[in-house]
Amino acid sequence: MKDESGSMKEEFGQFHLHNSAFIIIYVGYRRFLPRRRRADSAHRVDAQSRDAHAVSYRKDSRRSQAAGAVAPASGGGEGREKVYLPVLHRIGTNIQCELLKAGFYPAGGGAMTVAIQPAAQLKSLDLTQRGQVRRKLARALVANLPRSIGERELAVIAKKFALTQDEVRVEHVSSPGPGNIVMLEIESDRVTEISTGFGELGVRAETVAERACAKARRYLASSAPVSEHLADQLLLPLALAKGGVFTTLPLSAHTRTNIDTIKKFLATKIHVREASAGTC
């Protein structure tokens, strides 16, 4: 069937699949050629579980995590709270997390709590459009290190993204060991992304900030709403729930491994389709 725009749309129960000119990943669906040209390159991921009713939550659950450390690929507690969980809430989950203490490698010692409440009903996800960028904020966290490190990092980001004084902030955080992370938060209509740079021994603060800027520029250069790290995190919840579709950047090796692993344990089809610049 065709929607009002004239593009092809197929119905699969409660799930709707629209054709797109993105690089596409389909899970359990037929493939359609994209109709529009795009200058950027992205991926689209579709996921649908054959047994969507197999997942249910019977009682409240509360879990605490401690003695951890943030890792460059994870984005830390900020990534979970502002990037990952809001997307999960859109499919019907009720999960809250609170970062109690930051932990930096190698000392670790980070602590957070995660509260999971029963989900009344899980829904499919449709996250194929980012919408307009609403604002950009930059924060530098420093633990047991001079404040000037964070100030130098933020000076680089503020210059490259034309941020005002109100849009940058240095924060001292409590942690067992020394550590530093700078985060550039990009809030759009339908999703938030956080690009990070981690302080390392012997690496200049300006270099750390440049790394965060490079990630942010790569994300903004594409119109895909889902970053490569968020793409990896969304696969399993979608496979266990009602499935969904999202567009993302070119897949990381971690995401490809995750897709292969899910297929080994669940009856879920995941298809990836690429549509680079000039493909129509």
Image: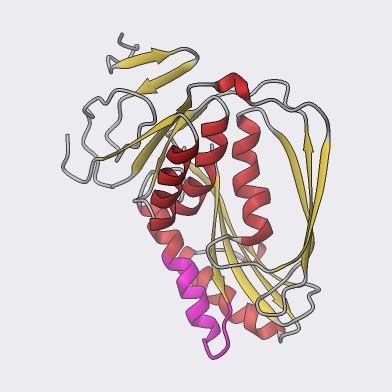
Q: Nearer the viewer, residue 206 or 166?
A: 206
* 107 relative to 270 in the view: left or right: right
Give the mark count: 0
Q: Is residue 50 left or right of residue 112?
A: left
Q: Is residue 92 above or below residue 182?
A: above
Q: Residue at x 48, y 80 (%)?
A: 207
Q: Would residue 167 appear left or right of 64 to someone viewing this image?
A: left
Q: Which residues are magenta?
A: 199-214
Query: Which residue ends up furthest to the front in the rendered image?
Result: 264
Task: Name above or below for residue 244 compared with residue 133.
Answer: above
| Image position, residue 67 (x, y; %) | 77, 68
Q: Is residue 208 shown in magenta?
A: yes
> Please, which colouring scheme is shown?
secondary structure
Query: Whole-percent x and y of residue 11?
Result: 40, 13
Rendering quarter of residue 150: bottom right
Tell whether position 219 is magenta: no
Residue 9 placed where, x, y %? 33, 16
Q: Quadrant of the C terminus?
A: top left
Give the residue drawn at x 51%, y 74%. Answer: 209
* Outermost top residue: 1
Question: Does any portion of residue 272 appear in the rendered image?
Answer: yes
